[in-house]
Image (tube, rainbow, N blue to C red):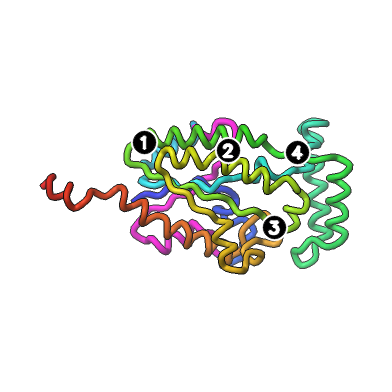
Amino acid sequence: MRILILGNSDTAGLRLERGERAWPDLLREMRPADTVEAVRFVPMGGAVAYVGGKAAELEPDFVVIPLAVYVCAVGLVSESVGRRFGRRARSAYLRMERRYDGATRREGEPGRLNRAGQAAARRLLGTAPLAPAESVVAVYSSLLHELARREGTQVVVMGDGHFGREIQRQNPSLPAVIARVQAAIRPVVERHHFSWIDAEAAMAATGRRHESMHHDGVHLSAEGHRIVAALVHAALPALDSRTRPSPASGAAGG
């Protein structure tokens, strides 16, 4: 079987330490007979056409779509700067932010000075998401409608994790935005008889939800990657059974 993952920085293993594995790599180990291909996907711009091209190229049996709510749920100072002062100002701010962040973290964790600087920048310069929630919903809805036209392709959509405590504190509207996006997407999933799985619920069920997130509050930890890999792996047999002919139909065909 061929599995196409429409991934993000987590599927690329961003923030993992040497020797730690991203969940698509773990999934490959769990399903050695299958081909697992992960491509970068951002629900903006010409994303649907891009996926259509990839699907035509790879002809996947399954498409796994982790919802990337970061682009509409998390406010960024750099995005606010870019909208107010232009792209060059945005680039300059990002360089300054990276230098400041690197100088004020302690053992990878944001210390008091780091948090104070972030809070001051957010207060003085404001924040803005990369895209409005409505446009993200529109991209995902169009994508699901497009995949539904591909005969024999099954789809599993994964609700995203809800980030770490610091990101939640900085973005008080985050739970409402995530809920709004998921409430809009789930009826589309159900209409096409696709499958829904929930990364946040799976992490919470372990009783170690905080440990499932990297200390940056955005990405998965190694433990979080193991949880997501197991979650996706468990969903695929149910999907696989839909694509196989029943014994009765097989007998009739013989």
> Which of disc 4 and disc 1 is earlier in sequence?
4
Find out whether the residues at labels 1 and 4 contact each other: C-beta distance under 8 Å.
Answer: no
Dot 2 corresponds to which residue?
Answer: 43
> Which of disc 1 and disc 3 is earlier in sequence?
1
Q: CA distance from mark 1 to mark 4?
A: 36 Å
Q: CA distance from mark 3 to mark 1?
A: 37 Å
Dot 4 corresponds to which residue?
Answer: 128
**Badge 2: few (under 14), some or many (20 or more) residues near its Cα, within 10 Å?**
many
Boundaries of the magenta span:
21-48
Frontmost residue, 89 versus 219 = 219
> Which of disc 2 and disc 3 is earlier in sequence?
2
Identify which amino acid the numbered label 1 is placed on.
Arg
Q: Tag on residue 37?
A: none
Dot 1 corresponds to which residue?
Answer: 150
Q: Secondary structure under badge 1?
A: loop
> Which of disc 2 and disc 4 is earlier in sequence?
2
**Badge 3: few (under 14), some or many (20 or more) residues near its Cα, within 10 Å?**
many
